[in-house]
Image (tube, helix red, strand yellow):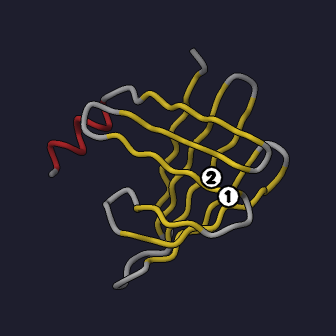
């Protein structure tokens, strides 16, 4: 598993985002795996955490360029997790948080 994480971290993921009002489709593809989520701002939806656990998520607008999504595990216990996506100039800033650990990844539009 550690090898997969190292490969994924070193790869350049391709992110496709489609938006129709408050409805979003986000597809992230790497050499290790591809994830897809569909959701509407303000409505809960099911997704998987980065480590594969199922959770209930709720995305809200933090401001006009940034969304915040709180994740709640469906089963078991674990850290409190969230992600944010923020548009700034030609960059998409993706932040994952787990308790007090934060990871930030910056994507540049192709």
Depth check, front residue: 55 or 99: 55
Hey, which residue is sitting farthest right in the picture?
A: 64
Residue at the spot of label 1? 68
Q: What residue sits 72% from the left and 58% below the top?
A: 41
Given residues 32 and 8, the one toward you in this image is 32
Q: Is residue 2 above or below residue 60?
A: above
Q: Which residue sits at x=33%, y=33%?
A: 30
Left or right side of 45 for 3:
left
Residue at 32% across, 28% down:
11
Residue 58 at x, y percent in the picture: 63, 67
Quadrant where the C terminus is found in the figure: top right
Q: Earlier in the sequence, mark 2 or mark 1?
A: 1
Q: CA distance from mark 2 to mark 1?
A: 4 Å
In the foreground, 59 or 19: 19
Asked which secondary structure carries label 2, the reply is: strand
The residue depicted at 62 percent of the width and 61 percent of the height is 69
Residue 110 lies, with reference to residue 20, above or below; the image says above
Position of residue 7 measured from the top left corner of the image (x, y, whole percent): 23, 35
Query: Which residue is the extreme one toward the top?
Result: 110
Element type at marker 1?
strand
The residue under label 2 is 84
Q: Quadrant of residue 4?
A: top left
At which x and y percent is residue 87? 72, 35
Asked whether, in this view, residue 62 is left or right of residue 73, the answer is: right
């Amino acid at each position: 598993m550690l090898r997969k994480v190292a490969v994924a971290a070193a790869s350049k993921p391709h992110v496709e985002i489609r938006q129709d009002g408050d409805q979003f489709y986000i597809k992230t593809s790497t050499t290790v795996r591809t994830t897809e989520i569909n959701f509407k701002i303000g409505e809960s939806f099911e997704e998987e955490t980065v480590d594969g656990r199922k959770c209930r998520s709720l995305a809200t607008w933090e401001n006009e360029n940034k969304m915040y999504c709180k994740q709640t595990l469906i089963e078991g216990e674990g850290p409190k997790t969230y992600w944010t996506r923020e548009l700034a100039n030609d960059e998409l800033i993706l932040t994952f948080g787990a308790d007090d650990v934060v990871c930030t990844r910056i994507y540049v539009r192709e």
